Image (cartoon, rainbow, N blue to C red):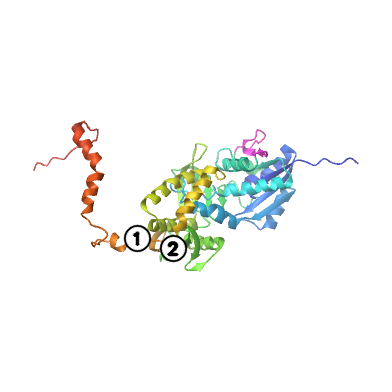
Amino acid sequence: MAKTESKKKVVLAYSGGLDTSIIIPWLKENYDCEVIAFAADLGQNDFPNAKALEEKAIKTGASKCYVLDLKKEFLEEYVWPTVRAGAKYEGTYLLGTSFARPLIAKYQVKIAEKEGAYAVAHGATGKGNDQVRFELTYAALNPKLEIIAPWKDPKWHFHSREDAIDYAAAHKIPLNGISKKKIYSEDGNLWHLSHEGGVLEFPEQEHKYEFLKHTATFEKAPNKADHVTISFEKGNPVAIDGKKMGAVELLEYLNKIGGKNACGLLDIVENRLVGLKSRGVYETPGGTLLYKAHECLQQLVLDKETLFEAQKMSMTYANLVYNGQWFTPLRQAMDAFFNEVNKVVTGDVTLKLYKGNIIPAGIKSPYSLYDMGLGGFTDVDMYDQKDATGFIRCYGLPLKTRALLLGKKTNVDFGGVPSLKK
């Protein structure tokens, strides 16, 4: 009997959600390949147990399904460095999806190499950021792998999530509550949960927050404030209220107390990498507390120039992470800077949490640069107020010189001067 030729293998980044669930049979139909699913457990709130996810993938047509618990690596190697950098995309978004994708893609490449697969596949659309984050990681770690991106594939004939739901129904693929009435697109991990689609596609419309899973609304938050103390060592969170905790336990605790008090709820319109704008609602309760505490501690321990440069570089770092450029020389070089800066970001920060407000309620550090005498109003030997006269004279010399030499030629518009006549 002739030996049956084995089919080529494709490793799919699999979540069990709408897109990746229908992609398994679609790949088999259109590429005549063996599909190997890979799911990363990053602490998703609705992440099924490994056995259930594996069973679903195989029933849908996968030959096998890898399920890996990557929560600890996710926080320590991807989230904490971003917190140390103080990186917020466009000043608000805490990058919950952005730094998850490179980690998933890294292990996807590892599994492809182990299995001898010729290609990797993902379910990101051609209108979003995730396609870039996946594919830049593939390029950085194994450029020889072929990439199958169904939403950009000529063979893909779906034009909406409704089309995908119809295909799933025809193939009897369970969707775990997703329907044409509940069509929000969600992406979650231990750090955050994002919501897109539905009424959120209309920026002029208020939504009812009916989809929230981690965060209370301001109206439903308690009428009594909570306090929490977060301890840092070299920029990394290590303890809550004096109790040492591992990364996963620590963030789970902060998510609980932050979500209870409606902290970290964000509704924004952001600029996607591909050039369009999108609206999203993000729940990042614990992460928002960590960013605030880290910022407070930096203000206490960093000198003015270092803090200024760190704040500037944090914007570049945020753009790199958002744009999928995790495995790049520039981001790695910037890590060296932020690691040096955070050597003194050690101490305790107490936060008061009340109906979405995060209020500093105490900061201390062995590396504090705050001097009570210098910072107060009482004269001290170290600072002579009369010295400020000469300093300001030198500091303002360029302005004074310009005014004397140019006079009314200056292009400075001081506006109309009100009449002083009685």
Q: Residue furthest bottom?
A: 242
Look at the numbered disc 2 and give the secondary structure of its residue: strand
* Mark 1 closeness class: few <14, some 14–19, many ≥20 residues within 10 Å: some
Q: Which residue is mark 1?
A: 370
Query: Which residue is at the far left?
Result: 422
Please name the amino acid that badge 1 sits on. Tyr
Q: Determine the residue positioned at 53% across, 53% down.
A: 79
Quarter of the view holding residue 359: bottom left
Do the residues bearing badges 1 and 2 touch, measured as CB atoms within 8 Å?
no
Pinpoint residue 402: horizontal percent, then vertical percent: 23, 36
User: In the rendered picture of this protein, how many numbered marks are placed on residues?
Assistant: 2
Residue with the most extreme top position: 409
In the picture, measured across the screen, residue 307 lies left or right of residue 65, that is left
Start-end of magenta stretch: 143-159
Instruction: Specify the label residue 18 is tagged with.
Output: none
Residue at the image position 52 percent from the left and 55 percent from the top: 80
Q: Assign the N terminus to one quadrant of the image.
A: top right
Q: Is residue 26 magenta?
A: no
- Label 2 neighbour load within 10 Å: few <14, some 14-19, many 20+: many
**Percent position of residue 183, x then y:** 57, 47
Tell me the CA gap for discs 1 and 2.
13 Å
Asked whether, in this view, residue 22 is left or right of residue 261, the answer is: right
Q: Quadrant of the C terminus?
A: top left
Identify the mark at residue 347; answer none if there is no mark.
2
Residue 46 seen from this side: no
For badge 2, the amino acid type reads: Gly
Upstream in the sequence, badge 1 or badge 2? 2
Outermost residue on the right side: it is: 1
Q: Secondary structure at mark 1?
A: loop
